[in-house]
Image (cartoon, rainbow, N blue to C red):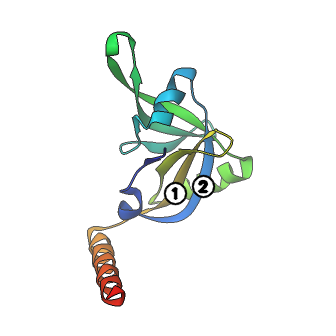
Amino acid sequence: MSILNRRAKFDYDLKDIYVAGIVLQSNEVKPLRAGRASIQSSYISEIKGEIYANNLEIITAKKNFESKKTKIHTKLLLSKREIRKILGLLTTKGYTAVPMEIFFNEKGLAKMKFGVGIGKKKFDKRETIKERDWNRKKQRVLAK
């Protein structure tokens, strides 16, 4: 089960894509495995030379069948070289880091895939929509 941010590629022109480990508490793993989380409003920032994912929304189950939404910020595990490269891009004007997907690898470890890029303008988004529609029409014609 993976948690996706479908708007990331539409809203941003991503230059680099990274995969990082996530530091989680024990009560946050089970809801992530079940897909009870959201990364739509989350963002990635730098705190004291380390990369953190902020506003990661996890819905944890409590006793008596109540659920509790918690917004957490968690550390991402990257190599020093990757951190320096990301921080260099983030200090450049206009660049932001956007979470794209949270998944579990074959070893069962939680990973976050995120991209670093520039936000698209409205006309860029329209161009993306036109290109996507054209490709769909082309596939339909070729399939017949």
Q: Residue 115 carries which label?
A: 1
Q: In which quarter of the image is residue 56?
A: top left
72, above or below 111, in the image: above
**Whole-Å distance between the Cαs marked 1 and 2?**
6 Å
Give, as a three-letter code, the residue at label 1. Answer: Gly
Residue for point 33% across, 76% down: 132
- Residue 52, how many percent across, how many down? 55, 38
Give, as a three-letter code, the residue at label 2. Answer: Tyr
Q: What element carries label 1?
A: strand
Is residue 20 shown left or right of residue 15?
Answer: right
- Residue 75, how many percent across, how many down? 59, 35
Is the residue under label 2 in contact with that under label 1 (CB below 8 Å)?
yes
Crowding at label 2, few (<14), some or many (≥20) Cα neighbours within 10 Å?
some
Q: Residue 86 carries which label?
A: none
77, above or below 72, in the image: below
Q: How many marks?
A: 2
Q: Name the residue under label 2.
A: 18
In terms of depth relative to the viewer, which is nearer, 131 or 76? 131
Residue for point 73% across, 47% down: 80
128, above or below 22, in the image: below
Crowding at label 1, few (<14), some or many (≥20) Cα neighbours within 10 Å?
many
In terms of depth relative to the viewer, which is nearer, 48 or 111? 111
Q: In which quarter of the image is residue 26?
A: top right
Is residue 45 shown left or right of residue 60?
Answer: right
Q: Which circle's residue, 1 or 2, is located before the other in the chain? A: 2
Q: Residue furthest front?
A: 144
- Residue 59, how many percent across, how many down? 38, 28
Residue for point 43% across, 38% down: 35
Is residue 142 shown left or right of residue 88?
Answer: left
- Residue 27, how many percent across, how many down? 52, 21
Q: What element carries label 2?
A: strand
139, above or below 108, in the image: below
